[in-house]
Image (cartoon, rainbow, N blue to C red):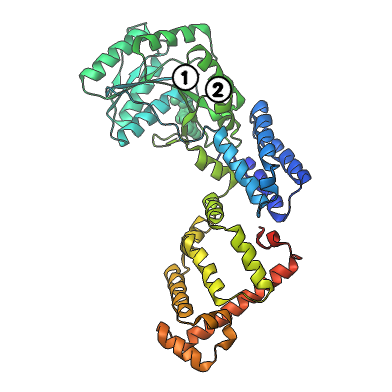
Amino acid sequence: MAFESLSDKLQGVFKKLKGKGVLTEADINEAMREVKLALLEADVNFKVVKDFVSSVKEKSLGSDVLESLTPGQQVIKIVNDELVTLMGGANSKLTYSPRGFTIFLMVGLQGTGKTTTCGKLANYLKKNGKKPMLCACDIYRPAAIDQLEVVGKSVDVPVFTMRECREPEIIAEKAVKEAEMKGYDVLIVDTAGRLQIDEALMDELVRVKKAIKPHEILLVVDAMTGQDAVNAAAGFDEKLGIDGVIMTKLDGDARGGAALSVKQVTGKPIKFIGLGEKFDALEPFHPERMASRILGMGDMLSLIEKAQENFDESKAEELEKKIKKNEFSLDDFLEQMGQIKKMGGIAKILDMIPGVNSTAMKNVDLDESQKEFAQMEAIILSMTKAERKDPSLLNASRRKRIAAGSGQPVSKINTLIKRYDEARKMMKQFTNASGGKKKRMFRG
Ligand code: GDP
């Protein structure tokens, strides 16, 4: 799969960053040097790498990052966001005609997978409720027409051909008429390819474009050709104007540099990726998902965002003061549990951590842990204010009263007090170890 080695390298860089409680400018510079090398080795366009690294560096050196509670994670988040932007931001959807009949013109160099992709796209559209028709416009290679017919049969989509005609724009026009007349709502036009961009091919494509005014011109490029794919995209866009790119063979490309460069170099987004030879191996391209995949993060970002949303700095300060003065009460303990609940509970948190999908973790009884929270809450709320503030007041008779009030056995109350004691001790250790510096306590 694409990005394997890039992914490994970036994760190595971030592991080092996360291991540090405090980040200096030198740490960031070193990390960015490694990020740069990793991207270059993945065959990302040199200029794209330069811009990317300088943008990440500038954002990472901001005081809001360096002085934040989790600077390492902030840098990872910046890299992630920049990767998403680099690949085009949100998923770029196909544009359909408002009139109801849409034409997609497929262009690309020979061997990139254009004909196969026509079939994959037809298959994809069919699954999404469309009624597509294919059109063969390669006037040079009869075998190319045969191939599209085979593809059409495989995905059960009709193919329009005019084997004797030498003018692709006429074939395309006739196909449009026929498709509309027969009630199809999408026409996918396959065109001739060349080994490289040449004037004759471009003239021909421009003529087809003028004749049928496609709603989208989709360029098929082969990820395995790396920067050649990016150059092809730039060339086609300059001479013909393209709306989007379909990048094939990402399944066989271990580096992924083309996928990371195309948008930045050409301004045109990748709309789909091809991940195999079969007709269902086509996926809409989602930059956010690809970035998460490259960074090996699962949905860790949502988790960081959630933690940030729920983290209240002034409350954290107050809490630390209390811990130091030995004033961490059962009310505070309850509030801490409330924070976890606010983040969606243990089940949600576990779900967002990469790797937790394993069967072992799924066996954790999540309902049970939610239930436990509710019981703890009931117990604490059954105590008097004074008891919550000073749990040492809780003698046997008070515990019995609380048990009756909360509907829990006394043993549960004992367990809760024990947990609270442990939490208090642990937090005190943290604050002492940090030498009075609040922020380190939470640093990852
Ligand atoms: P064209 O000359 O551009 O029309 O290319 P073809 O459609 O004939 O495809 C060339 C080769 O690439 C064929 O063997 C396809 O099966 C293969 N191919 C196309 N797309 C993909 C893909 O996404 N992944 C892999 N592994 N092979 C692909």
Foreground residue, 341 or 50? 341
Secondary structure at numbered mark 2: helix
Which residue sits at x=48%, y=82%? 383
Q: Which mark is residue 233?
A: none
The label number, if any, that marks residue 242 in the structure image: 1
Residue farthest to the left? 182
Q: Is residue 163 visible?
A: no
Identity, as a three-letter code, of the amino acid under mark 2: Thr
- Please identify the quadrant where the N terminus is shown: top right
User: How far across and down, in percent of the image, does residue 16 sit?
Assistant: 71, 51
Residues at marks 1 and 2, CA–CA distance in whole angstroms: 10 Å
Read off the residue under disc 2. 266
230 and 90: which one is in front?
90
Residue reaching furthest right? 26
| Residue type at the position of mark 1 | Ile
On the image, the x and y values in percent for residue 233 come to: 53, 21
Q: Residue at left 63%, top 66%?
A: 318
Q: Is residue 302 left or right of residue 165?
A: right
- Residue 278: which quarter of the image? top left
Dot placed on the residue nearer the N-terminal end, 1 or 2: 1
Residue 388 picture quarter = bottom right
Q: Position of residue 57 (x, y in %)?
A: 69, 38
Q: Report how many numbered discs are placed on residues in the image.
A: 2
Position of 76 relative to 136 (above/below)? below
How many residues crowd mark 1 within 10 Å: few (<14), some (14–19), many (20+)?
Answer: many
Q: Secondary structure at mark 1?
A: loop
Between residues 262 and 43, which one lies in front from this camera angle? 262
Crowd tier of the residue under label 2, counting other residues whose Cα lies within 10 Å: few below 14, some 14–19, many 20 or above: some
Q: Residue at x 76, y 42 (%)?
A: 30
Depicted 430 relative to depicted 80: above or below: below
- The residue depicted at 50 percent of the width and 14 percent of the height is 194
